[in-house]
Image (cartoon, rainbow, N blue to C red):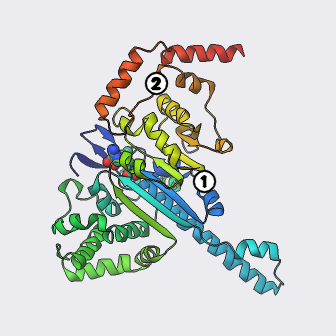
Amino acid sequence: MENVYPFVTNDGSVGLYNTEYDDIYHSVKGAYSEAWDKFISSAELDYYLSTCNCVRVLDLCYGIGYNSKSLLQKYFDSQKKILKNKKNFFKKNKNQNNSIDTIHSDNILNKNFSKLSVEAVENDKNLVIYSPIFKNFKNYNIASQELSNKEIKKYLAKKIKNNYKFENFINLFILLKIINSDEFKDEFKNLKNNFQDKDFTGYFDTNLCRYMRFLLADRYAPASVGPLAAFVHNIYYHYISTCYKKGLKAFNDADVDIKFNICDAREFVKNANRTYNLIFLDAFTTNKCPCLWTYDFFKELFRLLDDNGRLITYSNAAHVRNAMMMAGFYVGKIYNKNENKFTGTIAVKNKSFIKYPLSEADLSLVRSKAGIVYRDENLDAENDAILLERENNVKNSSLLTSSQALKHGTEVTADV
Ligand SMILES: C[S@@+](CC[C@H](N)C(=O)[O-])C[C@H]1O[C@@H](n2cnc3c(N)ncnc32)[C@H](O)[C@@H]1O
């Protein structure tokens, strides 16, 4: 993981910083909270679970997987809810000795689990390999604060926990998927006993690391398992227990799958020929990684999105919104209720899915120089070349600048 450095974000989940891109992978406010607030809260997974036999999801720029993991968490929670409803239904009817009301019972009893199939795309193989072993620092900022009042601590703890939910069995599920995938065979064969990078010491979950070593030793014999007694103790008591059982069950469950594609996201979308209900786009910021924000890239995503699908991203940039609109999408904003502000963009083919349309000011920006899109006709240009071409287009354009456009936009709105 060259050029990549970890830090603890404000909700206790680990975030990363890349010196080459000079960009962070995750919001300092919280890597998990960001995944929930920006991607999962607007994904409407329950809608897809009630309308599709298999919900297909494309996670572009998987990184260390917070978006996919949060979606899996939401999926398993929905499964649990359906099971609970079924159980309650049987209990109620048994107690009341009722003849079952058929329409209601059909709804509850015939509600099967929809499948969930996630395609994760990422060009840094090491991030994917290590993605299941990053730990969560529970109540990190609370422990590090000198708060004398217990009530405040309790209040803060509750508030942070409410921002996201994550159960460790999902890491185990992903770990098993990765270790059993042919994609990573060569890397695992070469992994030495001490596979922990020194920069990451302390950011990995010790038990999951041990378990990874154990699985690797079992399969490729490159790693020693460490003192057996400690291993058995930790694995058994922490993971063979509920978490391990849940992870193994999820792994063996035919209803849920995650597949990893280690490649340039442009290559993946060019060759993909199925449609997706949900597409998450979580690339680095637009001026650091312009190749994943071009009109040409969005045209491919338009082809890949189901008619009732949702493309979700954190970017609010006018040129991104313009590229989406030029590609054929209806475009709206994502409202983050925890922060009480708009923190992203949603692109759809079904206009009725837009809850928060772009405002007149947003549209003014889209029509200004700020809305001039990045181009990458063959989906193979270098980032620098894409930036330079746009810079020239902006220079030579007679459109209003963003500040002129905003001023003009407010005058127009005031006139109406
Ligand atoms: C903002 S981070 C994504 C964070 C991620 N969603 C997570 O939950 O950890 C952007 C990611 O895009 C990856 N990336 C950069 N350029 C890419 C490309 N052309 N194709 C695929 N992945 C790329 C980086 O390695 C990085 O992991």
Q: Which residue is labeled 1 in the image? A: 44
Q: Which badge, 1 or 2, is on the more N-terminal residue?
A: 1
Question: Is 47 on the left or on the right of 154, as rendered?
Answer: right
Indicate whether 104 appears above or below 281: below
Camera-near label (1 vs 2) is: 2
| Residue 58 locus on image (x, y percent) | 47, 54
Q: Which mark is residue 372?
A: 2
Q: How many numbered marks have been drawn onto this rendered protein structure?
A: 2
As helix, strand or loop, the secondary structure at mark 2 comes to: loop
Is 69 rendered above or below residue 395?
below
Is 392 above or below relative to 351?
above
Nearest the eye: 273 or 196: 273
Residue 331 appears left or right of 296: right
Q: Which x, y percent locates residue 114?
A: 59, 67
Q: As rendered, which of 301 and 402 lies closer to the eye?
A: 301
Q: Amino acid at mark 2?
A: Ile
Amino acid type, mark 1: Glu
At 25% from the left and 59% from the top, the residue drawn is 202
Judge the density around disc 1: few (<14), some (14-19), many (≥20) Cα neighbours within 10 Å: few
Q: Is residue 6 above or below residue 251?
A: above
Percent x, y for residue 232?
Answer: 28, 82
Q: Position of residue 147 (x, y in %)?
A: 42, 50
Task: Give the label on residue 163, or none.
Answer: none
- Tell me which residue sits at (30%, 68%) in the image: 182
Q: Is residue 164 left or right of residue 265?
A: right
For residue 397, say whether it is visible.
yes
Circle 2 packing at 10 Å, graded few (<14), some (14-19), many (20+), is many
Q: Name the one closer to the observer, 53 or 37.
A: 53
CA separation, marks 1 and 2?
31 Å
